[in-house]
Amino acid sequence: MQKRIYLDWNASSPLSKNAFLAMKSTFANFANPSSSHCEGRAAKKAIEKARDKIAELIGLNTRFNIIFTSGATESAAMVLHHKNLNCAPIEHECVKVWSCSNLVVNENGKVIIDDPPNSTLQSANSETGIIQQIPNGIYFTDAAQAFGKIFTDFSKFDFQFSSISSHKIGGPKGIGALIVKDINNLNSFIKGGGQEFGKRSGTENLMNIQGFAKSIEDRIFEINSGKWDEIKSNRDYLEEMILNESYETLVVGKKVNRLPNTSFFITPGWKNDLQVATLDLEGFSVSSGMACSSGKKIKNNSLLSMGYSSSEADCAIRVSIGETTKKKDLEKFVSVWSSYNKKR
């Protein structure tokens, strides 16, 4: 049986070796970081060291800019649950559930914003990979998909809050961060023991925090060393093969700035759920969009917002690749995908 080929990195990336080793190093540090004894202080020191490292890596001034959470969904809830901001229909569900989906998306997938302080805008779309231009003064930007795939210096952005997530960049699941420009503007959401500067109570997850910090360090090194330029080249190679095999297939956002690893394409008449299931049986992991919407019919998804028809949206699949994806993996994928496309 052929070894499976994973092509769904936007849903979750494999845990990197370095992140795993960083997590493993904490196994003996079992103490509660809030305890005042020697073991507790050691655990707390490790957390603050990781927080300082992350702040340095992403361009922030102090540790007070970073609040550890369980991930981007919780981060969004912390700052949006008491607001009713403007957002676009292409936003992740964790943003739309708290916001008003009234912003216009143009045919290129770009969102038009007239009132940034009362709006929220994702840094990049998880399905199409289309990168947004974040306007100055935006209240919240969900950077979970963009961060770790493109260069991101948060000191260059004018925002109130942003979110990043570990499992999108080779770190463990269940950990992320809310990035705060001014901690005094953040109200306590989860109350209790007063952890995370009194803004998010609960015993800190030292193991995942360490893995998260290491995954950020690794991703930034990869971006700076040109690894993600290579990934973009592989993505472009995939799309070239697909379009050569199928003249009717459309690549969404091909002419605009996208995440270097993301390809979202429509093959009219071939339902995406059938494509995903067929390819899964053949050993390829792809998706029809956001993992959180799997099995659900989302009315206002990214394609409908861009002006594509419902029938076209029902025939789109996403291939998202990463550091370990090889050209030969993509060649195998296209060969199988093309053979089934010709049979239908």
Image (cartoon, grey):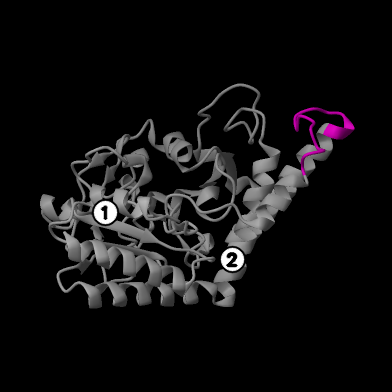
Say if 337 sits above or below 41 in the image: below
Q: Of residues 49 and 219, which is closer to you in this image?
A: 219
Query: Disc 2 or disc 1, which is closer to the eye?
Result: 1
The amino acid marked with disc number 1 is: Gln
Q: Which residues are magenta?
A: 26-39
Q: Of residues 129 and 2, which is closer to you in this image?
A: 2
In-image side of 202 versus 298 (left or right): right
The amino acid marked with disc number 2 is: Ile
User: Are the residues flagged by discs 2 and 1 in contact, CB closer than 8 Å?
Assistant: no
Residue 10 placed where, x, y %?
42, 54
Residue 317 placed where, x, y %?
28, 56
In-image side of 119 versus 103 (left or right): right
The residue at the point 81 percent across, 37 percent down is 29
In-image side of 24 versus 42 (left or right): left
The residue at the point 64 percent across, 61 percent down is 217
Q: Of residues 295 and 130, which is closer to you in this image?
A: 295
Residue 141 placed where, x, y %?
40, 51
Say if 91 sits above or below 233 in the image: above
Which quadrant would the C terminus be assigned to in this image?
A: bottom left
Q: Which residue is mark 2?
A: 220
Precedes in sequence: disc 2 or disc 1: 2
Q: Which residue is mark 1?
A: 275
Identify the residue at the far front of this view: 1
**SS class of the residue under badge 1?**
helix
C-alpha separation, residue under disc 2 versus residue under disc 1: 34 Å
